[in-house]
Every structure is written in structure tokens, then in C-alpha cells.
Image: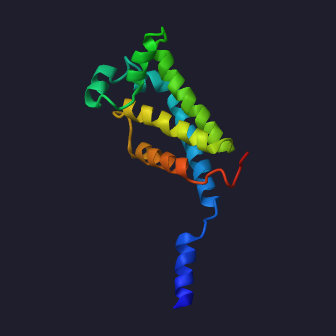
Amino acid sequence: MTRALAAVRAFWLAPAAPDAAAFLRLALGGLALVQLVALWPHLLALYGNFGFVQWVVVEAGNNAWVPSIGKLALVLGDWGIASTTTVYAVFAIYGASLVGLVIGYRTKLFAVLAWLAHTVTLNSGFFSLYGVDTMMHILFFYLVFSPAGGSGATC
């Protein structure tokens, strides 16, 4: 009985090796970078104010507290920043955070940035999204709290 209890304790309480989290970081970052490169030429059509679905329609479906590119563009517009610049800036921050995750530099910081930028993009273009975006969002959240920088290509 003592042996069985020790096995249960070891299974639930022993620290896990960070290899799986590092694989998740590398695989998710790489997949998201490939997706971003494929979407980059079409960002304004999918996420811009005058794209396939205008922000007026997108914002009508969102709650007031949900962050989106349209709301961010309204705030930055007061400072003279164009809405197209806002779209590209959000995706540039997202891309930079993905590169940081893939190379393993400051993985907690870049996991938080990737998750926040993905949140903004997820709430802005939900007419063009499909299930993989939701799964990626959940996995970015996991990366925020996992020891993803503990193994693999880390700095």
C-alpha cells in the first residue's frame, strides 16, 4: 500500500520536466508564425475598418469591455495614428512576440504579449476565424503559466 501511495504522490506532486511545455512553445509559435505570414497580405481585408466586415458590424456584436482593434484604433486615432497603422501595429507586436517564443527569449513576457495580441485579433476578426484560432488562444494562455522556457531553444 505504501508503494502505491508513493507512486500516486510521485505522479501528482513530482515536478514535471519542462520538455512538453517547450515543445508546445516551439510548435505553437511556429504554427502561429506560419499563419501570420499567410495572413499578412490580407490583414486590411480581414481586420481593417473597411475590409470584408466593417468595424461597425464587428463592434455591434462585442461587449463594451472586450478589447478589439477597432476600439484600440479609436483611442489611438485621438493621437493621430491611422486605423491601418493600428492594424499593422497589433499584428507586428503579435509577430514579435511569436518570434520571442520560438527563439525562447523571455518566454513569460512574450507568452503574455502573444496571448494579449491574439485576444485583440480574436475579438476583431471573428467572422474569418475558425476552430484552430480558439485552440491557439487556449494554448497561449497555457504558455503564460507553464515552464515553457525551461528546455529547448532557450536564452
- In terms of depth relative to the viewer, which is nearer, 38 or 151? 151
Q: As drawn, which residue projects farthest toward the right?
A: 155
- In terms of depth relative to the viewer, which is nearer, 131 or 16? 16
- In x, y percent, where is residue 136? 47, 46
Q: Is residue 66 left or right of residue 25?
A: left
Please determine whether, in this image, residue 6 is positioned above or below residue 79.
below
- In x, y percent, where is residue 142? 50, 51
Give the residue displayed 33% in from the left and 21% down from the top: 55
Q: As drawn, which residue projects farthest toward the top?
A: 80
Q: As drawn, which residue projects farthest toward the front?
A: 2
Q: As drawn, which residue projects farthest toward the left?
A: 60
Q: Total of numbered circles in the picture?
A: 0
- In terms of depth relative to the viewer, which is nearer, 55 or 81? 81
Q: Is residue 106 left or right of residue 13?
A: right
Give the residue displayed 51% in from the left and 16% down from the top: 85
Quadrant where the C terminus is found in the figure: top right
Q: Is residue 61 left or right of residue 34?
A: left
Give the residue displayed 39% in from the left and 28% down from the top: 68
- In x, y percent, where is residue 6? 56, 82
Residue 54 visible somewhere in the drawing: no
Colour scheme? rainbow
Please determine whether, in this image, residue 107 is positioned above or below residue 16.
above
Give the residue displayed 43% in from the left and 32% down from the top: 120
Residue 1 visible somewhere in the drawing: yes
- In x, y percent, where is residue 10? 58, 76
